[in-house]
Amino acid sequence: MSTSAVGAVRDAFERMAAVDAGPTGLNCILWTDEAHALAEAKAVDAGRAPGVLAGVPFVAKDNIATTHLQTTCGSRILEGYVSPYEATVITRLRDAGAVLVGKTNCDEFAMGSSNEFSAWGPVLNPVDRTRVPGGSSGGSAASVAAGIVRIALGSETGGSVRQPASYCGIVGVKPTYGRVSRFGLVAFASSLDQVGVFGATVSDAARSLEVIAGRDVRDATSADCPVEPYHAAATSDLAGVVIGRPREYFPSSLDARMARRCDAALELLRSRGAEVRDVSLPHTDLAIPVYYIIAPAEASSNLARFDGVRYGPRAQADSLREMYEETRTRGFGPEVTRRILLGTYVLSAGYYDAYYKKAQEVRTLIARDFHEVFDSGVHLLFTPTTPTPAFEFGAKSDPYEMYLNDIFTATANLAGVPAISVPIGDIDGLPIGGQLIARHFDEQTMFRGAFALEAARSEAA
Amino acid sequence: MSAVDDYEMVVGLEVHVQLLTRTKAFCSCSASYGAAPNVNTCPVCLALPGALPVLNEEAVRLAVIASHALSCTVNEISIFARKNYFYPDLPKGYQISQFDRPLAEKGKLDIGTNADGTPITVRITRVHMEEDAGKSIHDRYPGATAIDLNRSGVPLIEIVSEPDMRSAREAGAYLRALKQVIEYTGVSDANMEEGSLRVDANVSARKRGETRLGTKTEVKNLNSFSGVERALEIEFARQVELIERGGEVTQQTMLWDANKGEVRPARSKEASHDYRYFPEPDLPPLQLSLDWIRRMCEDLPELPAAKRLRFANEYRLTPVEIEVLTANPPLAEYFESIVQAGADPKSAANWVIRDVRQLLNAGADLRTLKVTPEALAQLLGMVRDDTVSHAAATKIFAIASETGAMPQDIARTEGLLQERNEDALAGWVDQVLAENPDVTARFRAGDRKLLGVLVGLVMKASKGRADPKAVNQLLSARADAGE
Amino acid sequence: MPIGPDDVRHVATLARLSVSESQLPELVAQLNGILAHMDALALVKTTGVIGTEGVGDSAMPLRMDIGPPIPLVHALDVFAPEVRDGFLLVPRLATHESTGDDESLE
Ligand SMILES: [Mg+2]
Ligand SMILES: [Zn+2]
């Protein structure tokens, strides 16, 4: 890789061409402007923003606001929309010297686990182009896996970074809720959304999270909590670290090969000095019902602003009511429509208590599970990131079957705790990931475990 | 006795008041009026994808002050909620408001006194914070509605009363009392014409003696206090007639049309409003410390009721005088500065109520009034010790209100001071006695009834400058002396 | 609580989405399929449990009452569908909605 920013950005664009990152190929990158990216790179080489990521090219999910490239959230309802303001995470990366080289494909409004729900077509998994890259941040994951960039921004609501990271064989991080500013992240489910990062290695992920983390006055839910030097967690072993193995994440129905890979990973963690304990998170099986009430409910409200009045394409109509319905019905795809209807229903008069209110209460029980385990002296939890490796396109036709992909990841979003997915091997040549979950704002210990696992695996290999 | 008299009107009011902040509730855009359309907008109040609200601390402070002024209990924790509905001037598709846990609850407002002197009190259910919507203009472009979002996100409080009012007059009294309290606290202009105070009324009718509430309708688009009272009378009459004809009142939103002077249903109940309230996930709970809340209460300015009471005790004024003088803080302050400058409260009150208000009614502004409280106090002093006559004082006041000169200087330059100089007085007296020999003769003969006549003549001769008391003494002295 | 076609129609109206009668049966089936799994929650005892209002129990940070606002690097008329004289234009509201005041502020 070249050492200058311009060189690095050129390499990125050459790689895009080589792997055919566009619609005729992987379809992982939607919007680019090479000339503009090179101009930014020149400025960096000239000394602008001599930060820790000076000259590092990156891509960002299409639901993160950028002032030069489109921000469509993979939806027709924002076709051609270029944001007049920039997301805080983009500004922070650029101020650290990183250069945005593209916006990446994703499931429409981040609703999906396979990237089959993008208005701009599915993303192919670079490891096996007959399979999905996972979702919703599939384009970002594929861009890193294909070697176009080493770091990429995605967004998490129920596993949308960790699951594609695991399907594509890279590292994916979901930070603590409030750790990273959501300002400029187009909202799906505000109480669950969090910007996440992909890295070719744990170190790539750690360095980029370090840059984007920290309080932002433009986001009232961003926490005022010191950001540690995550990359420094690499040096230490795991002496004194207790890792819990939650039995609910290893059901008898779990693919035996998946279970074996996980046990092998746990062995490696032990070999670095960690103590492994069996623990229980009793309300785990309720995560999907709770998630699929709360997320659609918040989404139905968050997506009301897409009404054709102020931005985005507008359907021509004589009455306002027609304009609304035509614009929204044409603009939203089937999965988004389904979730808006579902979310509107669970919030509507007569059903609020049975669904939304109840779900929020059960969500409290799920969060309590984590608090209790961590209060019992456990520092980290280790689980499979997903029940299976990447599946083939069209394999999951029933919506709920698709939702079950998030079964091991949605819990961290509901509880607000940080989690990372790290490659732990493969099944029939398809990568799989192991997940490390830490307590609120303890990303440092999470990275410590991830670095150790990564190092142990490369030594073992 | 018409049917209407067998029924009782039951009214509860929802009042929206715009808070006087520099910037909007959830973004840093200017909250001021009068800018070109959509100039005061940003990613947040345009509801651009990815934008987030951040609450304005001054809006919270003003809302808490208003809540205290209405004797509400301010909650240490209140929660913002989303009220979801589609409307083109509501950019997010929801209004950020408060629902389950409002900022303040359980207040009251005295709106007058019963015949027996006991206060008429209206209970305040709650005061909650919310954001304003934008403006929809329907008649500017053919076939199109024009949207201006400058107002979108401006901070409001909604003040909800219990259904405690029993007549349109009481509703009017409540609104005037509320407006006065708000003006006293200074948290808002509370100007209905400019839209910084807006009223929705819930009204129902029931047979007198009935304790259960009838089905209410909500009357909106009320644009003046008198409009509120008229609209209530008309809607009440409509409901009574409906009931009398054996019909049933349907719960719906009615619109007041001030021009036609009629109340009509607002919109078909299709998709009957289902706002799908839920806690606003972009805003954590609002937490206020008890002692901050207490401090806000201590910082409250004197409120109308307290001021009226104090004026009665300190200045011994009549209820009517007090009502006038405490109408608004500036007038009350003007009055009190006159008294502080040494004037007698009673005469200060008279002058403010009569002469000063004449100037104000003629368009003068209290803050730029040429007659300062000190000047007026000086003038009242001159009247008290007879340095000038009442007639002269009125003349002096008129001149002062033009020139801003001090009364003493005016009196001197205009020669309006009363003359006490012995020689000058003697001169006029001699002149009058000389010019009226027969009157003088009868007066000297002991007809003291003529004293008044002579004094009058002397005053005339002195063109009003002679001090009548002095003249009186002088003439009496001459008579006694038998001169 | 199974969803019926009328529920879906009602919810679609609230959400300003038009659902064709032909799509209706499939949507009803899908939503019921999803909601069936949600009924598991009804069996969970949550008496005395306070619902999670957002995640993290930090109090709300407030902003000072000062500008300037976050700037727009592209003007409104660059990204808005229809702007005239600075106003955003939309089709005239149908008569039953003709007065904004009944909903524009509540
Ligand atoms: Mg309101
Ligand atoms: Zn704004």
Image (tube, coloured by chain):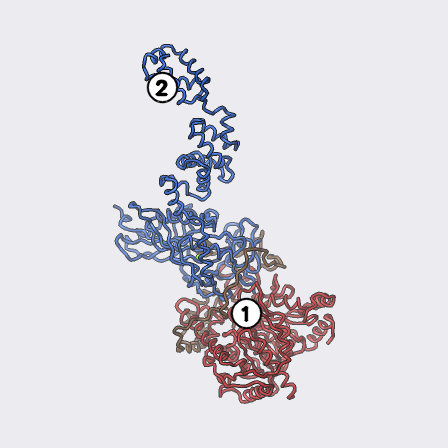
Chain colours: A red, B blue, C brown
Q: Secondary structure at mark 2?
A: helix
Q: Do dots 1 and 2 share one subunit? A: no
Of residues A223 and B425, the one nearer the viewer is B425
Asked if ligand 2 lies within 8 A of label 1, the reply is no
Read off the chain for label 2. B
Task: Give the image location of residue C2, x and y in percent.
Answer: 40, 74
Measure the C-alpha gap from mark 1 to mark 2. 93 Å
Contact? badges 1 and 2 (CB < 8 Å): no
Label count reads 2
Task: Give the image location of residue B449, x and y in percent.
Answer: 32, 17
Task: Give the image location of residue B229, x and y in percent.
Answer: 37, 47
Read off the chain for label 1. A
Q: Quadrant of the N terminus of chain A?
A: bottom right
Q: Is residue B349 above or below residue B440?
A: below
Q: Quadrant of ligand 2?
A: bottom right
Checking the image for residue B452, the label placed there is 2
